[in-house]
Amino acid sequence: MNSLRSTEEKPLIEWGVAALALEGEAVSGDLHVVKPFPNGVLVGVVDGLGHGDEATIAARLAVSTLESYCHESVISLVKRCHGALAKTRGVVMSLASFNATEGTISWLGVGNVEGLLLRADPNIVPSHENVVLRGGVVGYQIAPLRAAVVSVMPGDILVMATDGISADFAKSLNLTDAPQQAADRILANHGKKTDDALVLVARYLGQKE
């Protein structure tokens, strides 16, 4: 199990990721980023168009850009990637930026990387929320960007999955599972095996006093 901290003393999330390249390919164009910054953590999943080397090149450049500017807003990050990837085949992506000070995430998606936030508290309505996906391809053409800000509580679970994971992946989720266990199960049960596939699961721990 992985955990990441906004500072050395304050873990914000624990997370796990499971991924599989398309059969016959040595590399995958589905990549992830989990990068802490002061009082926050950026979590993202990037899917390079197609598969193979060209998809991987685009995805790696996107991840490098995200890591370099992880403290910026998710809209700014998508715009930076859009500029950096202009000479690649492009990517689709979803990003979520955790803000421990405010107890929120700011998130958005371009393309078809699914994002799902599950509430740990059964009394909270709605019990889950989905990232709003905008059309386009980062590096080629994107629709006007709009980020949503939602509150998060300790124990809430964020899941991001590329289109190599079937859309019914939530059936395999159990809020009590460790994130890595949850990611492994989703990949095993819902990986399509007709494309690169990646799923990332992160549990928000909150900021310790």
Image (cartoon, rainbow, N blue to C red):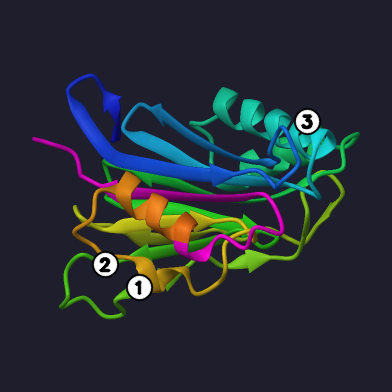
Residue 149 found in image quarter: bottom left
Q: Do the residues under discs 1 and 2 have CB atoms within 8 angstroms?
A: yes
* Magenta extent: 189-209
Q: Residues within 10 Å of mark 1 (few under 14, many from 20)?
A: some
Distance from disc 1 to disc 2, alpha carbons, whole Å, reads: 6 Å
For the N terminus, the quadrant is top left
Examine the image and state in which quarter residue 152 appears. Answer: bottom left
Residue at the image position 35 percent from the left and 26 percent from the top: 38
The circle drawn on residue 128 is 1
The answer for how far apart the CA atoms under marks 1 and 3 are is 34 Å
Please identify the residue farthest to the right as the structure is shown.
87
Q: Is residue 124 above or below residue 150?
A: below
Camera-near label (2 vs 3) is 3
Judge whether residue 40 is colored magenta: no
Distance, label 2 to label 3, CA atoms, is: 35 Å
Q: Is residue 76 left or right of residue 17?
A: right
Q: Please name which of the two marks, 1 or 3, marks the residue nearer to the observer.
A: 3
Kindly identify the amino acid type of the residue bearing the numbered disc 1.
Answer: His
- Callout 2: SS: loop
Front residue of 57/41: it is: 57
Precedes in sequence: disc 1 or disc 3 = 3
State the residue position of label 3.
Answer: 57
Q: Which mark is residue 119?
A: 2
Residue at image coords 74%, 34%: 56
Quick one: label 2 or label 3, which is nearer the N terminus?
A: 3
Q: Is residue 80 above or below residue 160?
A: above
Instruction: Name the spot of residue 171 as percent of width and height, x first.
Output: 39, 74
Q: Are marks 2 and 3 in contact (CB under 8 Å)?
A: no
Amino acid at circle 3: Ile
Expressed as whole percent of the image width and height from the top left, the position of residue 146 reads 61, 61
- The C terminus - image quarter: top left
Q: Amino acid at mark 2?
A: Arg
